Amino acid sequence: MNSFWDRLDTSRLIDRPALGRGLDRSLGSRLTLVVAQAGAGKTTLLQQWGGTRSVADNSAGPTLVHLDIDESDDDPARFVRHLAAACPSARPSADILAATVETGLTGLGEPAIDAMALSLGSAQETVIIIDNLQRFSNVRLVADLGELIARSPRNAHFILSSRVDPPIALSRYRLHDDVLEIRQSDLAFDLAEAAELLTLLIGHRLSAEQVRALWMRTEGWVAGLQLAGLSLRNNADADAFIDDFSGSDRIVADYLSEEVLSSLSSEQRRLLLCMSVLDEISGELVDAITGSSGNQAVLDSLERESMFLVPLDHRHRWFRFHRLFSELLRSRLRAESPADELRILTSAAEWSLTHGRVKPAMAYLLRAQARDGALEAMLATAADVTEHDDSLDAIRWQPSSAEPSSPVAPAISERVDAEALTGARRLLTEPEHPAASQPATGLGFVAAQVLWRARPEVSPESAQRRLSSIQSQIARKRPESLPREAVGELIDALVSGGRAHFLAGHLGEARQWLSRALDTAGVDPVDRIPASSALALVEAWCGNAERANSLIAETLHAARKAEMLGHPAISDAYLASVVTAVGTDEAPQLFDEQPSETTGPEESQGTPAAGLNQADLGAEPSPPAALTVASSALFSRAVAALAAGETQSARAIATAWAQLVPSPDAISTVQHRILLAWLSSTDEIPAEATRHLTEAVKLAEVHGLVDIFIQAGPTILTLLETVTGPHASFSATIRMRAGQSWQPLGNRVLADPLTDRELEILAYLPTRFSNVDLARRFYLSVNTIKTHIAHIYRKLEVTDRDAAIGRARELGLL
């Protein structure tokens, strides 16, 4: 029996009868292609199938021969000798056939092709399996192999297995239905096959949830499932392993690095790292983030090379990376060039907005922490977002972006989303619906109109006309006969106009309209809710935190008593809470210190609310801003204490870390481990220091965290040399990056050094970009850009742009 089939270990194989039956059809085709990425199970499938059809088991069946290509087969004469020797019934002999290859040719040549075709015709029915075809670098030889296949008699069947689509004209085979193609989607394990494989590898069954989680993470990629199973065999905590399993996991990273990345040029590798930032990839988008052109051809080539690229449309214009491959690339990019990820995200967002792809643009902006830009993008393109079902998830970002963690928050977010979205949809699908023209308190249509639809009814001018119309109708009625609905319409019109002015940037007018709405509502707490909620956001935006906090407390107290905490009008109060939380050390306490039920607008102005933890307001989606800021402040304080020899102060922080940072994220966990390592080193317990630091490096590698170690300083960088084993490589990357880190000398001589953001903006000053241009570039408001530029002038001790450019050049900052 051929040694290829002898190497088969059936004890670890999963029977795949459907694929076996598919390969049986290869006996009716001249050519079969098995093309997929590394680790897809191509060779194993062919071994399984060939083992069932080998001559030893079925003398009446076709002869199966196998060629495993290596680099030496690039020599045409050697390849012909290799092929002929594998076909024992072919005539003439291998040496005679090899002699037909003309000396000096890079390909087979016509004589050799004809001789091989005649030789195969003299043999019995033969299936020739050529494995690892991608190892050929002789393109001409592969093209001639295609010609040999085309000229071969019908008793010869070729199966080509490769990671790369061979340069063979397939159209003629497809036209005559003479080719069978097996691709990655065919080779991927289904859920049942994944469960069976994992059971074989681990020795016991995982739960259905655990299997599904691994299957989804690997997308049925056979090598990924095998690597996970082998790791789980020696891991007692399966749930923890599965939760952490990703493309940056050491065993997966090593495999992909050796099998895929090692074969790439530095330019190809760099391009893949940049592309990994993108959730969805197209040639034009890659052009935009790289500043180059022609990248659609690059994507086509990567797809042909099975570079873990998954097509998203039938025209193969949009792709995504396989999840594990993408995670590995992103981890490498964050470790090697962390600033590039932010640059790529902002470029991708800018391109997406320009091309009407609102949902991806907002996702990129939020990943880049450009929340102002995301909000502006959402408001500017709200009509498009609402009109298309595939973009509706983007709408959900607005009310829930704060993600408050109070017990009522999930219900609030879901109800606010649902009601606002219902209102927006009705405005689009039922423009004549009474609620569209006469919004009633409780339906949320005014909020939907202002937030989600750029409709003329809610522009400031039209709002004025609407208000005048309502006031005219009210004027014709006696006050005592004025129905409550009319008062509600008047309040809604005033709130609508106030919010329209706010979104248009007319803050003074917005405050006037919303104050009038409060006056109209009087002391009725329910009628006051929409106006007080919207006015709270205006005041928070203007920096009047005390007034905003008072209005937030009033709104939420009234909403709670009226069981309206899920009402869409409350969303403004939550947004105001986030704004005040980000801008101050204390955010308003939502439910404890409420104003009295009869408090009016004037009376409530002097009633500040107490503090609410920022983390409860969720100022950042992941990680929360307050949590990150708090842990970073504690970390900096402890590091400074350790550097100064004040061990007890640092130990107090490290010991109380769990209470000080009650909801740790990856960053805070790494920070804590670094402190524990430093303290263990100070206590002369090197084993404990290494253990803590190894855990820190392990987690940091998954999330691409490098700067934390550099910020800790030379003591920790020296201790990193003690990290061995699978995480030593990332430890070396950190130390390398530490050696490359620098701060411009000119910035260090300033009494008040420029911040990273100010240095970024300074770099654009010579371009003569206007403040508006800079605001668009950095996804900031124009006022924020002005503030940064004012800080730059002050720190450089200049008064205008030209002077700033000159001074920066003197200092070597430009």
Image: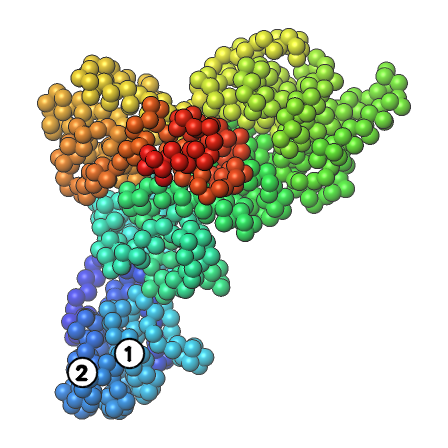
* Residues at circles 1 and 2 in contact by the CB criterion of under 8 Å: no
Where does the N terminus fall, quadrant-wise? bottom left
Dot 2 crowding, Cα within 10 Å, few <14, some 14–19, many 20+:
many
Regarding residue 490, the answer to whether it shows in the image is: yes
Q: Disc 1 marks which amino acid?
A: Arg
Residue sitting at x 37%, y 43%:
341
Q: Position of residue 201 (x, y in %)?
A: 23, 51
Q: Quadrant of residue 4?
A: bottom left
Q: Position of residue 66 (x, y in %)?
A: 22, 75
Q: Quadrant of residue 727?
A: top left
Where does the C terminus fall, quadrant-wise? top left
Q: On the picture, is 346 further left or further right than 136?
A: right
Relative depth, front residue between 378 and 427: 378
Residue sitting at x 60%, y 36%:
418
Q: On the picture, is 598 further left or further right than 75?
A: right
Relative depth, front residue between 159 and 280: 280
Element at badge 1?
helix
Q: Disc 2 marks which amino acid?
A: Ala
Dot 1 crowding, Cα within 10 Å, few <14, some 14–19, many 20+:
some
Element at badge 2?
helix
**Between marks 1 and 2, how big is the CA–CA gap?**
13 Å
- From the image, tell me which residue sits under label 2: 77
| Image disc number at residue 140 | 1
Q: Position of residue 11 (x, y in %)?
A: 20, 58
Front label number (1 vs 2): 1
